[in-house]
């Protein structure tokens, strides 16, 4: 089956620093990738959608200058949390969709803790 | 706008018994997909079952089956012969048909506990 990886699985950073999370589709080309945020015991909240080679589309209320998304290739998307604050601490999940498919394959998630 | 509602925040079932998780949705579209995802304590999202709206036959995957009522916009998940490994958060999700665009719309989830 299709596999999506995320790196790192856990990261702790200091307030004010930036942290990058990678999302890779390992055995398929992902024309579209999605980034979600999940608070404890809550559902997934879509942050942004990125299509390879174009700018990401952010959901309302998500700061695009704070959450930088790059989808530079058909197998890699990155989420950079800039000038992180403790309130950015959360679980971030990516998913990837192959071309002309309705299936979304999810990564294992990244737990970000900002101290 | 499309919405997905899961009215049961928590459910409990005895091992080997059957449990049904409810999901309703609101849409004006006629072509769409519905999904149930499982999120165990590892937090990895796992696709349990999918249903294409144009198919009248209810989808089944081993011990998992759905009751899809298109007119009522209802999409419940039945888990038969429940196992301890079924304990997880279950999310109902909607996706509008139309190529590669669009994104999943999730319900708030139901936490399922399985008692030995």
Image (cartoon, coloured by chain):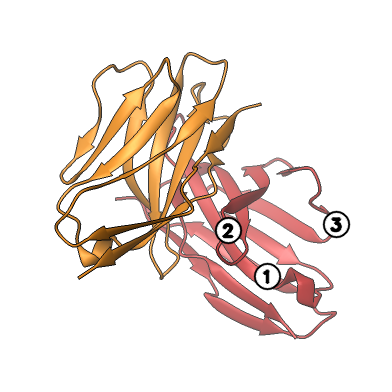
CA–CA distance in space, label 1 to label 2:
23 Å
Judging from the image, mark 3 belongs to the subunit labelled: A
**Residue A13 x, y percent position in the rendering:** 72, 83
Query: Callout 3 environment at 10 Å: few (<14), some (14 to 19), or many (20+)?
Result: few
CA–CA distance in space, label 3 to label 2:
25 Å
Residue drawn at the location 54% of the way across and 16% of the way down: B29
Quadrant of residue B105 within the rendered picture: top right
**Residue B75 x, y percent position in the rendering:** 38, 31
From this viewpoint, is residue B66 visible?
yes
Picture colour for chain B: orange
Pointer 3 and pointer 1: residues touching (CB < 8 Å)? no
Judging from the image, mark 1 belongs to the subunit labelled: A
Q: Pointer 3: what residue?
A: A65
**Residue A33 x, y percent position in the rendering:** 57, 47
Q: Secondary structure at mark 1?
A: strand
Q: Pointer 2: what residue?
A: A42
């Amino acid at each position: 089956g299709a596999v999506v990886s995320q790196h790192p699985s856990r990261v702790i950073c200091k307030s004010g620093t930036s942290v990058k999370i990678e999302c890779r589709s390992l055995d398929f080309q992902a024309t579209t990738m999605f980034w979600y945020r999940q608070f404890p015991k809550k559902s997934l909240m879509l942050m942004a959608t990125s299509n390879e080679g174009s700018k990401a589309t952010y959901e309302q209320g998500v700061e695009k200058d704070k959450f930088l998304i790059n989808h530079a290739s058909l197998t890699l998307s990155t989420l950079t949390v800039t000038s992180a604050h403790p309130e950015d601490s959360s679980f971030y999940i990516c998913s990837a969709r192959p071309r002309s498919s309705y299936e979304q394959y999810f990564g294992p998630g990244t737990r970000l803790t900002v101290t | 706008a499309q919405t997905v509602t899961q009215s049961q925040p928590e459910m409990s079932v005895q091992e080997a018994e059957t449990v049904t998780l409810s999901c309703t949705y609101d849409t004006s579209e006629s072509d769409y997909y519905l999904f149930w995802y499982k999120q165990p304590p590892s937090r990895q999202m796992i696709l349990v079952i999918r249903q294409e709206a144009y198919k009248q036959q209810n989808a089944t995957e081993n011990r998992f089956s759905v009751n899809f009522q298109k007119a009522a916009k209802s999409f419940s998940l039945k888990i038969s012969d429940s196992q301890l490994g079924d304990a997880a958060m279950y999310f109902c999700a909607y996706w509008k048909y139309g190529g590669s665009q669009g994104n999943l719309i999730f319900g708030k989830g139901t936490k399922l506990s399985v008692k030995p």
